[in-house]
Structures are given as C-alpha cells and as structure tokens.
Amino acid sequence: MFIPRLFANRLPGWLLVLLVMASVAQAEEAADAPAALDAHAAIDMHRGPACYTVDPYFATEVWSKVAEVTCLNCHVAGGDAAESQFLLQKLPAMPDQRQALLYQNQRAFQRMAAVLIDQQPRLLLKAQGGLDHGGGEVLKPDSTGLKILTHFVRRSDDGAVAAATAAVDQADARPFFEGVEMLPDTRLLRRVALSLAGRLPTDEERAAVAAGGMPALLGVMDRLMQEEAFYDRLKEAFNDIFLTRGLDDSAEGVLSYQYFHNTRLWPQKYDFSDLPEKDRKQAGYKLYREYREAMHREPMELIAYIVRNDRPFTEVVTADYLMMSPYTARGYGRYEELKDQFQDPEDPYEFIPTRLPQLTDDRGKSPESPTGFFPHSGLLTAFHYPHRYPNTETNRNRLRARMYFQHFLGIDLMQLAPRTTDAAAADAKYEIPTMQAAECVVCHRVMDPIAGLFQDYALNGDFQPRKEPWYEDMFGPGRDGEDLPAEEKWRAMQWLGERTARDPRFAVAMVEHVYYLLCGRQVLQSPQDIDDPLFAAKRRAYLEQRGTIEKIAQDFAANDFNLKYVIKAMVATPFYRADGLATGELQPERLAEIEDVGLVRLLTPEQLERKIAAVFGQPWGKLQGGDSKMDILYGGIDFKEITERIADPSGAMGAIQRIMANEVSCKNVAFDFTTPPSQRLLFPHMEPNVTPDDGPAAERQIREAIVHLHQRLLGRDRAIDDPEVERTWLLFTGILADAKAAPGFEKVDSYFCRGRDDKRLDDPHYTLRAWRAVVTYLLRQHEFLYE
C-alpha cells in the first residue's frame, strides 16, 4: 500500500494508524517474495527489458552508491540480516542478467520507502540507525548516501519511476573499448610466449599466427602450456598468491615431531661413508638444502600436476592425495614403498601423487580414519598451509579462515564490515560481542564456522586432532549456515573442500588468480567512495571487468574446471589484448574507465631474467638465485616478510635498470659478433667493420640491423624509415662522430666486454662500442622493461 505523505497529513490520526499497520503488513508480505525467488528463475521468467522498468536514478545512484556499498553487507541471503524482510539480490556483472534482479531490488527499496513511521519513511529511519536497526547507523545525517536515499524517496512519491523508461546501465551507451587499439596477433603471440614460457616465438609460430589469427594463436598456446617453463611460471604465480614458500628455512618443520619424529630429519642419518672425509660436511649441507627446497615446492607441485594432466582445478581443494619427491618421501617415511615409482630416485625434485596412510603418533596412537588413510583435501590439508598461517590462543584459527576466503573464494573478510566500531562499548554491552553485537557478527558469523573446521591444527600448524569441544563463545564449525556433522569431524577439511568446489565463487576466484598470473595485478574492486567525481567511471570499469571474469568463470565450470581454458580465454579478452588509445582521448572520466585495461606493468625480477635469457641466449644472473639481494631491491618478494611486489619503480630500481642495460650489452654485443653469423641472435647480417662512411649500401645495412634489434629486443616490426629507427640511427652515428672528434681513442674494445673465448676485440672504428650503446639504449626502453 502506498500512502503519499501529502495525503497522509490530511487523514484522521486513528485512520492513519490503521493504514500504516496495513501498509506494514502488506510490505512485509511482499518483501518475503523476492527472498524466496531464485535469482536465475527470476531472470528466466522473462528476459525482455520492457517488463523490468528500472529508474535510472535507482540504478546509477541508489544501487551503485548506497545499496552495493552498504546494504549488501547484511541484507542478502546468508547475511547478518538474512531474516530481515528487506532482502536484496546480489547482481551478476553480465548486463543480460542484471535487469530482472535490479528491478526486484528497486521494488524492495520502494516498499521500504512507502512505509511511514511517524510520517517518516521507514527506509530513511533504518539507514540512520532508528527502529532498532541491527546494523546501527550506516548513513550519517549529512552524508551523500543519505541525500541520495532521500531524493529517491521523493522521486518515488512523485511517480518518477513510472515515467522512467531508460534501460539499466545505459548512462553511457558508448562501447567500453571504443577507441582502444588491440595488439596485432603476432605481437600478442610474443607477449604470450614470453609471459607463459619465457621464450620468444619461433619463426614457424609467427608465420602460423600471421596467417591464422587468433585460432592459430590459441593452438600455439596449447603447445606452450606443455612446456616445462610454463609450469615454472604457473608455480611462481601461485606462490605469489598462496605464499607457501614463506616458511622458515627449516621447511622440514612442516612434518610434526608427533607423527614423523623418526624420519623428518633423515639427512642427519644419511651415509656419506663413500665420500672422502673432507667432502662429507659440504655434502650434508647440500643434501639438506635440496631436501628443504623440495619440501618448499610440494604445494605448488600439486597445482602443476593438476594443470599438466588436465584434471579439474577443483582438486586444489579436493585432491585426496599430495605430491612427494624422493627426498620428501624420506621425510614422510614413505620412500621404500614409493622408490620404484620414481623415474630417478635420486632426483630431489621429481614429484609423484600419493596418499599418506593413517598417521600414528609417537605413543602408537592413531587419529580416527575409517578409510585407513589421512583425509587429504588438496591445499587445505597440505601441512604447509596451516604452518604458513600460524594461530594464537586468542585468534583461534581466524587468520586461517580469512586466508581460506581470500584464496579460494576471492572474498576479503576485512571489507565485510567497513564501519568504525567502538570495541569497548560492545564489550560493555554484550556478554559475547562476536556472537551478539551486529557490527561484530557481520564478520564472525561467516568467519568463525570456518575457523572451527581448522580446529585439528595446532597453533604452529601441526596436525593435532582436538579432543576438547570447540569454543562455546564462537559460532560452531560449519559453512554458510550448514553445521559440520559430528560424524564428519575426522574429515572436516574434506567436508569443506567438497562444498568449496561447488561454490560458484570458487570458479570466479580462480579466474581472478589467472588474471593476476597474466596481468601482474589484482582485479578491480567495487569503488566505495561515492563522493569521488570519477565514481561512475570507476564503477563502469569494475562492472565491465567483472562481467568478463564471471563469464569466463561460468565457462570454466562448464569445461570441467580446466585451468588451461581460463588462461586461453583471458588472453583472448580485450583486457589482455589492449595496446593503447587510438583517439588520444584525455578526459578524466574516460581515463579512469580504461586505467586497468591492457598490460602496462613492470616485469618482475624473474620475468626480466627470463626475457633477457630469451633475447640474448643467456640470463643476466643478478635478479634471480644466488646470494644477490638485488631481486628484492627490484620489487621481488620473499613470501614471508615482503609479500607484495612493487608495481611502481623506485630510484633504486631505476639504478638497477641502468646497471642491467650496461652489463647485458657489455656481455653480449662482442660475444655475438664473435659467433658465426648463422648462429647470431643480435647481428646476423652485420659485421663490426661496416660504417656509415662506406656508402649508401652500408647505411642501409646498418639501418636494417637496427630494425632487427628493434624487433628482437622490443617486439616492434618497424619500417626502415620509422621515426624510432631514425632516432636509433642518429644515436649510432652520433657516437661514431664523437669518437672521431676525440683525439686518440683506444682502438680495441673494453677489457670488461670481451667476446667469445675471452677475446678482446679490435675496434678501430669505434663501431663495437657504438653498437653496445644502441643495445644499452634499447634495453632501457619501456617496451623491454615493461609488459
């Protein structure tokens, strides 16, 4: 029932009370309907937009700036206000699925706005913390959000909704990628080959893609994803996400003394009697290093095994096995029974899938296991995972629960309740604030049941089945309102993994991880600052990206959760293929929309080393491995204390770039010239004695060599008269001119830049040093240092 406020002012008091009571009852009855209506069924009833007239103001202001930012924290199925009569539907990002659900949400707001309490809309009273609103005050009196809601109520009173005919999300009908140039297929091939396999595409691959376009490129990707370098990259990227390498150096500590006391320190008992006495100590150190490295690798080897064998990626949370190498198998006490399954029992890094039998502790007792095996469930039960995220007496596994949501469902629990709360006031008012105070319950109702499922893991991460009941001042073990059955406690992680794999959010989270793998940055988050003048542009960018991710996630599930499908699908999207603006448009709103489009990110230390090796045939060697800490200075991570890569270069990183360019050029130019021409990578058709003074043919030969360098180092197929080729030509000739003008320059190349066989080359015309300057210049270019 709708009672305009102007009309209500003229009614007798007793009649107004009756009408309000009837209106409340009608609103409550109607509010229950959308709560019970399945989201997909609502869409399928009728997909035509004519049946769902949504007020553009509701779509662009109320929903995007108030409901999504504030109300959806609680007023959804499974939320803290799930039993409320004001329930909303979360919207999919794909436009063809949004209209019907957005219409339902608009109707829910209209019903709340129509109910008057003391001549004030119930909607506004609740938002300001009135009427015992469980969420307290969510909109301040002078806030933009409250002003938006107030204006919406007035529009509803004036019948503006009935007059609205604009379709949802049509405020800017311009195609999102209008004016954005896409990479040509051959350049996209180079980007993909370097990113996934750390190499340049072959001539055959370039020719195939030039002729066959995107279908041919996807075929090349199928072959790239069979190369070992791809799995190194895959493990590297997922290590960035799960950070399981961030254990202490004594990685064998993940094997608890309680169950592996006789085997976990097996290198101490290894027989080195066949070695000379003087070599045994170093051999022992080497054995321990390899054992610990193998133990560090185990979790990511599971991911590599799943992807390599085209197994459903849901096994990352459901696999009833773990990976062991000959060295880690000794730590688990399984080597003798597994050694015949290894191709090389002495290879510390050959991994095979296997299962642990039921564990037996140092007192001869075994935890419950009706199957006779340890209840494996992918990474959830990898001993590394709880060790990487240790617990405290007061935290009670909440950190582990938070990481579970972040890693496997893509949910940041810390953003569920962004409101500032007074913890002291909550403690004074409630006996158990985490179970009673609304501002606490919004997170703890979701987090604490998952924390309870980790109860069999000790503070340090050791597997120690809990004998005491779980804490009574926490929500009990379970997930999404479903309690863990008592008979399932022994396999609580498997119970969790099975439900996680069925959760649509799992597929979305894995697509987000692939986005990070390919783009080197996290996906966009829904903008929260509704006072930001660029809010609408940022929200449009978020929805566009979110729609792409959700569509790929749906197809991911339909393709049996094959992660290779996701990688290929993401590469084919405009988000990955974008190369720049064609129009030169500089409006702030448009720039905000496309800020996260394409790849403009600094290569990681590992990627830069691989690119140098791919281009020059050998790595630089100072950004990866060894004792050098230059990788950390260049934005790398150690997975423990430094867990986020630096995206924007610092002064130190700029200095490292200069050092790299000088040293790599110094190391490779003379080396290439002393290699047979048919085997050269940099100068296959050039000799160091060719100078511009030798005539037009020599000039053309030099320019063609510059074109080749641009293609090999930067991936740019430039014409011989391209401005960038001309710029490089002027650098080369300018250096030669300076050398001529300098009296008595040395006629041999630098001692530190010797060629093959450690030979110092003659350089009577200064051309070797000029070519080295050209290579140094190209190595400093954006196209080389960034992806």
Image (cartoon, rainbow, N blue to C red):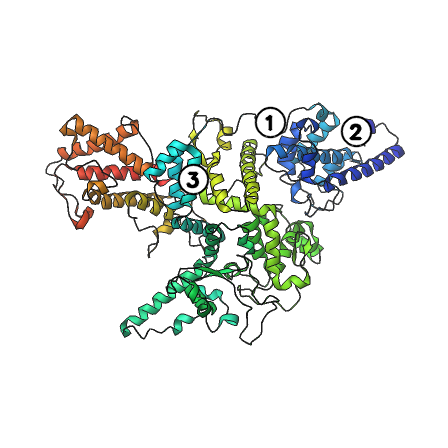
- Is the N terminus in the top left, top right, bottom left or bottom right quadrant? top right
Please indicate, yes or no, whether residue 25 appears anywhere in the rendered image: yes
Q: Nearer the viewer, residue 628 or 94?
A: 94
The residue positioned 14% from the left and 40% from the top of the image is: 763
Check disc 3 and give the amino acid type.
Answer: Gly
* Residue 460 disc label: none
Horizontally, residue 155 falls left or right of residue 212, namely right
Q: Earlier in the sequence, mark 1 or mark 3?
A: 1
The residue positioned 43% from the left and 58% from the top of the image is: 297
In the rendering, at what x and y percent does residue 665 appear?
25, 43
Check disc 1 and give the amino acid type.
Answer: Gln
The residue at which mark 2 appears reads as: 5
Q: How many marks?
A: 3
Horizontally, residue 1 falls left or right of residue 207, namely right
In the rendering, at what x and y percent does residue 501 appear?
59, 51
Which class describes the residues within 10 Å of circle 2: few (<14), some (14-19), or many (20+)? some
The residue at which mark 3 appears reads as: 219
Which class describes the residues within 10 Å of circle 1: few (<14), some (14-19), or many (20+)? few
The residue positioned 11% from the left and 41% from the top of the image is: 747
Q: Nearer the viewer, residue 322 or 743?
A: 322
User: Compared with residue 28, is residue 421 higher up or lower down, i.e. above or below?
Assistant: below
Q: Earlier in the sequence, mark 1 or mark 2?
A: 2
Give the CA separation, mark 1 to mark 3. 37 Å
In the rendering, at what x and y percent does residue 133 appear?
73, 44
Q: Secondary structure at mark 1?
A: loop
Which class describes the residues within 10 Å of circle 3: few (<14), some (14-19), or many (20+)? some
* Residue 170 disc label: 1
Check disc 2 and give the amino acid type.
Answer: Arg
Give the CA separation, mark 1 to mark 2. 32 Å
